[in-house]
Amino acid sequence: MNLSVNPNDKTPIYRQLYEQIASDVLSGALAPGTPLPPIRTVSRELGVSMITVRSAWEMLERDGYLLTRAGSGCFVAPINETHRQTKVDERLSAAVDALVQDAKSLGVDKDALLEMIRDRF
Amino acid sequence: MNLSVNPNDKTPIYRQLYEQIASDVLSGALAPGTPLPPIRTVSRELGVSMITVRSAWEMLERDGYLLTRAGSGCFVAPINETHRQTKVDERLSAAVDALVQDAKSLGVDKDALLEMIRDRF
Amino acid sequence: MNLSVNPNDKTPIYRQLYEQIASDVLSGALAPGTPLPPIRTVSRELGVSMITVRSAWEMLERDGYLLTRAGSGCFVAPINETHRQTKVDERLSAAVDALVQDAKSLGVDKDALLEMIRDRF
Amino acid sequence: MNLSVNPNDKTPIYRQLYEQIASDVLSGALAPGTPLPPIRTVSRELGVSMITVRSAWEMLERDGYLLTRAGSGCFVAPINETHRQTKVDERLSAAVDALVQDAKSLGVDKDALLEMIRDRF
DNA sequence: GTGGTCTAGACCACA
DNA sequence: GTGGTCTAGACCACC
């Protein structure tokens, strides 16, 4: 639950929050059932508006990562292993496709790209 | 010079144009000295505002991909091989870093990622 | 008296309880005079706060479904047949109106709607 | 495009807007490609906050009813006939199921329910 | 205490 | 002009 926000980043704050939590849920770092800190707390600690946090939470609930129980808080949603794996694949798949297409349009060949990935990992 | 634009895409139109031309210049598909069609032509054919096209052209000029010669139009800027290679690396680098970080935060290991890349390429 | 509660449902818990008991009283499944289990029992068994249960009970008493006799607990209130029928009609009436309006605004005609109802019943 | 809002209704304003537009799209009253009035206009005419309107629009885009092009406005999304029919069915289906279950738990039989529907339509 | 909704007003990027 | 994001602060319902 180590959230952080970079206000200079061009990606919207609520999206940054979304990505972090979604990743944590998908990687298993946040186990199903885990309660999230209250919106007001997150808001205060990150120095962003409650509405911005809520906006992220809402997206997360919509996409099945969170469950919110009015009056008692938000919790990591249950997710079965196969479903989890599917989502991980989908997510990475999109990123991989984008990168591969990028490389192709720049005239970079497969081996050069693979080499770059090995270096950075 | 096969430009295309998807108005429903969330990435701004001027950015779509920028990316296509920048890629073509970097991959060599557009050779230095090649003249670009007039802004109004591009504007008409793609069905986008001239202001949008001009905005993309300006960014491309600012970043050294294009040169404007008053009265005779825009041309692909000269670029030496080492410079070209540097820019290609910069562009891919950012994308690769993002992907690697994504994979890590999702708990996907290096080999699995490399395998995905091989598949998609 | 098979109460159940789904904390993930968007409808408030106290309302879920209200609906179940009200339905049971109106359908006759809970006969007038039947004693209800103590609030603390219901609270414990369903895993919800006593305040929530009390809140449902209060609404049920206000609407004439329950009677509280101090010191001896809650009981299903007496209800005469015509009154019961009226309430049943009221409840269904609202739901039917909503459905019919929904169907109309979606451009679904009467026969198609009736057919759907027959299928599901 | 006759939107209206009832502030006394317990359902949130943004939801009321959502339902109206979604219905219009599904019934064909709003044809694909039709531009919607600017958020500010809707906001002013209905006397609700821009953010409330945006909230509805956002849900509508998420659910595939609208497309928004930053800088040029919102448009009814393309939808093919079979998909449209599917959505209509889904929507009505949920409402029908709820009603049927309601009727059953109140001890109302099929014929009585059908009769009510016929009356109200 | 919690989350859910709404307002008023602001700034930015895009076309 | 358009939509996209954010803030500060308010009120409500629920637990």
Image (cartoon, coloured by chain):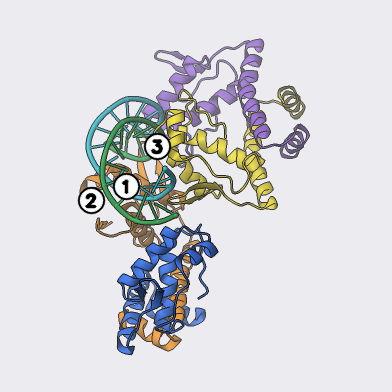
Chain colours: A yellow, B purple, C blue, D orange, E cyan, F green
Q: Amino acid at mark 3?
A: Met
Is B70 above or below relative to D56? above
Is A116 above or below relative to A101? above
Image location (x, y in percent) of residue B106: 66, 37
What chain does mark 2 sit on?
A: D
The answer to whether marks 1 and 2 mark residues whose Cβ atoms lie closer than 8 Å is: yes
Read off the residue under disc 3.
A50
Q: Nearer the viewer, residue D3 or B118?
A: D3
Query: The C terminus of chain D appears in which quarter of the rendering?
Result: bottom left
- Element marked by disc 1: helix
Image location (x, y in percent) of residue A62: 50, 50
Read off the residue under disc 1.
D53
- The answer to whether A65 appears left or right of A117 in the picture is left
Q: Nearer the viewer, mark 1 or mark 3?
A: 3
- The answer to whether A67 appears left or right of C98 in the picture is right
Label 1 – label 3 distance at C-alpha:
19 Å
